Every structure is written in C-alpha cells, then in structure tokens.
Amino acid sequence: MNSMGRRRSQITAASAAGLLILVGACSTDTDGGSDGENTAAAIDCSQFEQYGDLEGKTISVYTSIVDPEAEEQRASYAPFEECTGAEIEYEGSREFEAQLPVRLTAGNPPDIAYIPQPGFLKSLVEDFPDVVVPAGESVVSNANEFYTPEWVDYGTVDGKLYATPLGANVKSFVWYSPSAFADAGYEVPTTWDELMDLSQQIADDGAIPWCAGIESGEATGWPATDWVEDVVLRTAGPEVYDQWVNHEIPFNDPQIVAALGTVGDILKNDTFVNGGLGGVTSIATAPWNESANGIPDGTCWLHRAANFYQANWDESLEVAEDGDVYAFYLPGKTADDKPLLGGGEFVTAFSDRPEVEAFHAYLSSPEWANAKASVTGQGWFSANSGLDASLLQSPIDQLSYELLTDPSYTFRFDGSDQMPGAVGAGTFWTEMTAWVASDKSDEDVLAAIEASWPSS
Amino acid sequence: MDWLIDAGSTGHKFALMFVAIALFVVVMGAILLAVDRPKRVPGWVVAAAFLGPTVLGLGFGLVYPGLRTIWGSLLDSKGNAFVGLENYVRVFSEDQFQTVLRNTLMWVILVPVLATLIGLVYAVLVDRTRFEYLAKTLIFLPMAISMVGAGIIWKFVYEFRPDQPGVNQIGILNQLLVWLGLPPQQFLLGEPANTLFLIAVMIWIQTGFAMTVLSAAIKAIPDDIVEAARLDGLHGAKMFRFITVPSIRPALVVVVTTIAMGTLKVFDIVRTMTGGNFGTSVVANEFYVQSFRIRDLGLGAALAVILFVLVIPLVIYNVRQLRIAEEIR
C-alpha cells in the first residue's frame, strides 16, 4: 500500500511539473507524456457518490498491461480511489494469458481481469462457469448506454454480458512518412488499386516500398494474421469475414485463399518487400515493433500496423499529418468501401462483491475513459461514446477515434482474437510464419489451419 | 485462523514467518528429542521420524503431481473425458511433433558429446601449462550466465540485416561474413541448420562444466601410473587414449549423463531465441506451448510424460555408474 501511494503521488507531482513546463514554454510538442489535468484537486467527487463509501475495501486487478502503460492505468484509477476510499491492487504480467487459467483452476482468481481477446473470454466462461461472474446491473446499463451493440456483443457469451470494453485500437492503418511523400511527390492512396500502383511506382523509382515484421517471441506471426483479416474484409466483405471467423465456412474457403493470395501480392513479392530488412523470409525474423524503423531512415516507405505502433517510434520523430511519420487508412476496393479492423481489451469480474461491481461500473463509464485519456500521452483511446475526443493527446489516436465512430466505416473485431485459442493463438500464427519463412503455399497454410480447428 | 492465513502488512508477514520458524524448531526439536531417548524406542520409529518428512514431501511434491500428469495425459484437451492413448498417438504421428522429437534427439546427442569432447580436449591441452588458470576461467565464464541471458547474447550474434546501402549489420557473425565478401545469412531461419545454431549456445554454456570436472579428474590420476606409462614409452595421443580416458571414465560418464539430462529439459534457449518457430521447437517448449498457450492440457501432459520417460534411463545409468565408481574405491 505504501509504495503504491508513494508512486501515485510521484505521478501527480510529475504531471504537475509537466503542466508547468507546458505553460512556461508554450511548447508545441505533441508527445508530451502524461501531462494530465487530472490532478487531485480537480476531481469532482459528486459523480462517485453512486458507488457508495468503499473505505478499507481492496479490489485486485490482473492484466497483461505492464509498465510503462501500466503506470497510466494506475493513474486513471486515482479519482475512484480518492472519492470512494477503495484501494486498487494492480498486477500486470507478460504471462497473463498462461497464468490466468492457472489461477482460476487453483481457486485464486483476481477480482477483475482485463482480457484482450473475446475468444479467450468465451473459453474462460465455458471452462470456469462458476468463477466468471456475469456483469451486475449498473455495469450492464453502462455498457448499453455508452457502447454500440457490437461492442456489447464482444463481451457477451450465451446471451449474458460478462465483460465490458476497456481500451480500443484500430488496425487498418498504413504508416508512412508525410515529409518523404511530399518530397517524392507521392499521394496517399484512397483505393486498393491506387495502393498497388503507388507500391509499383515506389519500386520503379528504385526503392523497396513495404516493410513488415512478424517476430514477437512466442506470439510470432500475429501481425500477419492482421494482414489476412484486413484483406479478407476488403476482398470478400464483412459478411464473409463474420462467417469465416465463426467457422460457418471452412477456414480454407476459396474466398479466403484468394485473400491470402492478395496479401502475397505484397508480402511475397520480392520487389515490394522487405525495405531495409532483407528479402521475403526476413519478415519472419524482423521484430514487429522495430520493423518500420526504415521509414524515417528512407529504406522503407509503407508499413501496415495498428495505431498503437506509434509507441515504437523514436521520441525525436513528430507523429502528425504533416510530420515525420503518420498513418493513412488502409484503403478498400473503392473509396466508398471502408471496412475497419480493430481490437480491444475487456473487463471481466471474478467476484460479485459490491466494491468489485462498483469498480467494474467505473471502468465502463465515461468518467474513467476521460480520466484515462487525460493521463495518457499517446497510444490509447476507447469505444466509449462518452469519451471527450479533445482529451486524446496524439493526432493518430484522434484519427482512430474518428474512424471508429464514423458510421461510414464498417467496424469488425480482430478475427484471430475471436477464434478458439488453438487457432487464433496457435496454428494461425505458426502457419502464417511458415507461409513467409519457408514459402509454404497459400492452400497448404489454410488447409493446415482448417485441420487444427477444434471439433467441438 | 484468519490471522494465520491473511497477512496484509509487512510486519504481519514477518510475524507469520517467525511463527513458522518457531513451529519448525518445535517439531524438529521434538523429533530430535524423541530420537535421543534411550534404547526403548524401536528402530522403525527412528527411521520413520527421519524419513517420514522426506517421504511425505516427495510424495506430495513429486509422486502425486507425477501420477496426476500421467493420468492427465490420458484425458482430452479440457481434462474431462478419457481418451486413452490418443494424445500419444498424435505426438508420434503428426508432422509438427515429429519435428519436435527430431530436434530433441539432435539436442540430446550433439550437446553432451560435443560439450564433453571439447571440454576434455581443452582440459588436457591446458593441463599444467603456464596460462592454465586464465584459460580455464575464460571457458568457465559462460556457466555463470543464465540460459535466457545466453540466448539474448547469441540472438544478437546471429542478428541479420540485409547487405544494402544505408543498412548496418549489428550481428557479429554477419558482419564477419560481409567483411569476407559473403552475403549475410539468416542463421535462425533455415531448417534444420537453425537448430544447430541453437545447440551451439548450449555447448558454449556446458563446455565449461565438462572442462572443470574432467580437469579435476585428470589431476587426480595418480602420478605413479602416469610415470609407469611414460617409462613404457607412451606419449601424446596414446597416453590420452590408454591412460587418461580410462582413468577418468566414471567422471566422463557423469558429465555426459548430467549434460544430457539438462539438455533434454532445454527450454529457455529455444524460447528466447526463436520461440519454437521455424521448426526449432523441442519437447519442453512444446509442452509449455500446448499446456499454457493452446490450452490442450492432455497433449501438454503427454509431452511432459514423454520427457519424463526419456530422462529415466539416463538417471538410472548415472546412479549405477556412481555406485560402481564408489565400489571400486
């Protein structure tokens, strides 16, 4: 408790210092860190009266979010802790997905966990029906009020709401360098054909247009699954995508084979990849979070990655529409065809104690979303309709939120996150790795994944 | 009771620790006191008092989980329905697991043999030279590095960057290749050579262990034997073949089997360097992936049992050799 409290006051002090520097220097820096207005004095406790007095109660939170993002998480709980008196015990672990089932089996569940995949949530509810607690009334009413039915649906298993969305991300982005584009006279493409023409043009000008990397430790391969999902949405459409994710059509349906072929037109094309990193096979060994370093260096021009990739840019780079690096929307077939791939985490409770439900309700409320936005420098936004977008501090987060809430875009949740673990966190990763590493054919890759789909 | 189970503050935890220590002292004191009591205590009570805690600990900490794992390997992925030997059939019939078994075989043959061989030759070469101390320290140093640490170091050694303008190599091996005018290589990608590059890391770590034990054994060879052999005209390679190796045979066996056991369980190097991708997975890594990531508990348990079965003959052989060595003495 003591160390937690100390850390919190350090954050507050650091935030205040950041604010002073901002005011003093009138800095235009877009990446100023956690210079939140969320200092203790500014908290209006009247919104927290509904949660009652929770003095002396502790709520344990177990997540896969580790420092530095974890620090922003803890800072966003400060209003709740100060107004209700409850204490949040935060524990982040890189081994979260492996350890959570172990803890549930052992009868040692956390009060609250943030689950990054709806598919994982579904298997937890199936495997531990007595341990996962359905959301309470206040949580359900928050979810229905502030989230679209699709987002509510991702946290619903067998008609019961278990989990509410926490953060969100948008994956249909292509990172590029606006300044380099301006110098070379390239235009941001608005259709898939324009994107391919642009790639060809860059290649004709003597450069390698695309860079990609899918190495991510034992999760190696996941960035490639996002590629496939994004392209399935574009070549086969959202309806087929839903059938594919829910296994209503085989994993190796001809339309998916065609989509993988389209991905291969870029990722398996030696004239298009892998800028600054080597040939096609180097995609398998390039760390995903360093693979776009060639963009500011000029050895690579295009990199498909989510909005959260911005955390990996060197701090000296300006992330802005007219800056050093920025992202454009990965275009659809036509300019009006706008599918959007994204993901998010979900808050699940394993206890029905009133303080746990209160905290769950807080996390699903706009108050939390706004508190989180104001303590987060970059790389975070939420699908909460009560979020005040002006609090988002980075232009790419603002763009992400804009696209997510724009009705002309058709949102779909990351497919591999919804599939059973044996596929979505297993063969889909490993087979896509084999697809680039040992040039396994499109048909063989998809057939192998289809064969691994659990029968029940 | 709550006070004993639920410790909130640091002081409380310390208090609990002292309670636990006091309990330990009381129990051990009681046992020792009981054992010290004059003759009337029968022999089996004494034996039970000494062996009891160990047997209980082993039973609860080793035998019970072992039996549970064996039982679990006969159940399905969720641990509910009995499926017989299906998990084992899968391990021995599916392509991906055959790669895993092949890799484990490569590891368990190459690492002990090469590490022991290099360690032995090195020990003989530096024996009684002027720079023996320094030379031994150098080769022993990798032993002090954790497997994960070694994995990260060697990942940098093997790091690949293409040979094109504006791109600098950061891996030493590829930089050497570029200096020699050769194209840089993706060491960790091509199957099955990538497993050999991982094996090199384990050999780098284990050679120091082999060298130290064997060097001590060589120094323990009685001088009179060596001198007698020398009078009989043995030198160099023949001395090594007919005197050194037979004299240190028990130490050699122990070194080879110990390294083999450690190698069978190798997990850290594979997980750190390739994550088991590109056809480099081994049984221990696959066991973890199946149990905790894919959550196929039956298959994970089956892999654990296979690992266990593979280690048993090595342990038995090792223990027998130790016994024989003791009897000779």
Image (cartoon, rainbow, N blue to C red):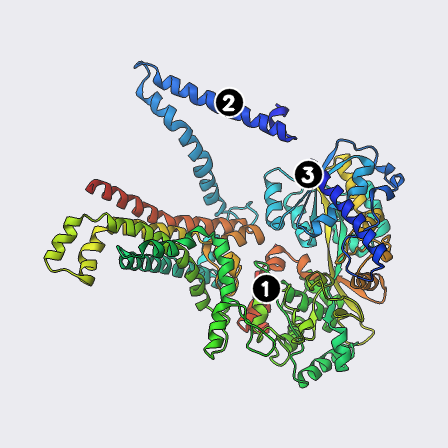
Q: How crowded is mark 3: few (under 14 residues within 10 Å), some or many (20 or more)?
A: few
Q: How crowded is mark 1: few (under 14 residues within 10 Å), some or many (20 or more)?
A: many
Judging from the image, mark 2 belongs to the subunit labelled: B
Q: Is mark 3 on a helix, strand or loop?
A: helix
In this rendering, the label closer to the viewer, 3 or 2: 3
Above or below for A224 versus A73: below
Residue at the location (73% across, 45% down)? Answer: A74
In this rendering, the label closer to the viewer, 3 or 1: 3
Distance between mark 3 and mark 2 Cα atoms: 30 Å
Residue A42: where, in percent of width, then height?
A: 87, 44
Residue B146: where, in percent of width, then height?
A: 47, 51
Q: Is mark 2 on a helix, strand or loop?
A: helix
Residue A58: where, in percent of width, then height?
A: 72, 35
Quadrant where the N terminus of chain B sits is top right
Q: What residue type is labelled 2?
A: Ala
Q: What residue type is labelled 1?
A: Glu
Q: In this view, does A288 lie to the left or right of B65?
A: right
